[in-house]
Image: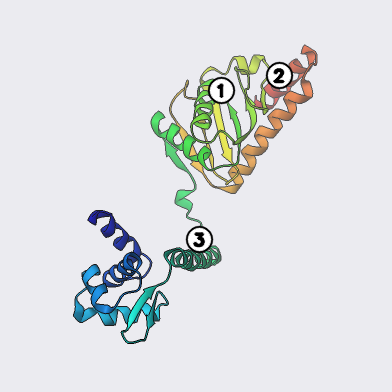
Amino acid sequence: MSEHSIETMIQQLTHFGLNTYEAKCYIALIQNGQSNGYQISKTSTVPRARIYDTLTKLIEKGIVFKHEAEQTTYTALDYSELLQKFQTQYNDVIRSLETQFEALPKTQNETLLIQTFHQEMHIKDKIEEIIKNAKTIYISCFPAIYKCISEKIAACNPNIEVKGIVFEETASYEHVITHRQTTYTNNLHNEKWFILINNQNEMLYGNDLSVKSLAYYTQDPTQIYLLKNFIWHDILVNEFVKNSNQDEDEWIKSKRETFFK
């Protein structure tokens, strides 16, 4: 093994509570097996003046064992047991920290409720971030964003579940429906939108990229609740009027016009 590899091992062992001398002594014992202080000092390059106090500290940590006979020798805890010991200790620490972090009182920072993105590149990066570690996403979108979402899913999270509705394009996911053609949707032009929500309570929404690069990110539960229900309502209406006659779409159109005017 190269000197560089040994140095790397020493540095890595120091992350687990050993100092440099202790790491060197342990590695020397793994290399040579049962050894006396002189042999360990020679292999490890730990000065002889420091070798015995270093070995004593390793004994106290349960990593090295001392054998008294005609000559005092030392052996090391098997490295597989050592690594298991480190893993157990750090798993316990991580679980403890996780519990304590969850118990911390948290204040919602109102200034971070909405973050605005004005560049296409940054919008696409945020879409990837929202998709990457999610199990489920909910969408309502037009072709430009739908294409971006599909590409990000294929690249970084192909097993994600996608639910929602897509406009002006045939849906390619099992739980995504294609919005029916209506006079209203055909005349949206510069009012096309997108909504992207994941199961981790993150949402990105804004204009379709064919209109302009403008999107908003939030973790605000009220906004997410409202827009997730907007998606569901849109799906419900589409399913309700599926295979119906044109009069029902005309009735919806007249009701919309009356409400908004």
Task: Residue 246: give its label.
Answer: none
Location of residue 9 by image quarter: bottom left
* Residue 107 in the image, given as x and y percentages of width and height: 50, 60
* Residue 19 in the image, given as x and y percentages of width and height: 30, 71
Q: Secondary structure at mark 3?
A: loop
At horizontal 61% and vertical 21% (from top left) the residue drawn is 167
Within-10-Å neighbours for mark 2: few <14, some 14–19, many 20+: some
Q: Is residue 17 left or right of residue 129?
A: left
Closer to the camera, 136 or 50? 50
Q: Which residue is mark 1?
A: 142
* Residue 73 in the image, given as x and y percentages of width and height: 33, 80
Inter-mark Cα distance, 2 to 1: 20 Å
* Residue 30 in the image, given as x and y percentages of width and height: 35, 66
At horizontal 30% and vertical 67% (from top left) the residue drawn is 28
Location of residue 176 by image quarter: top right
- The reply to whether the C-beta atoms of the residues labelled 3 and 2 are less than 8 Å apart is no
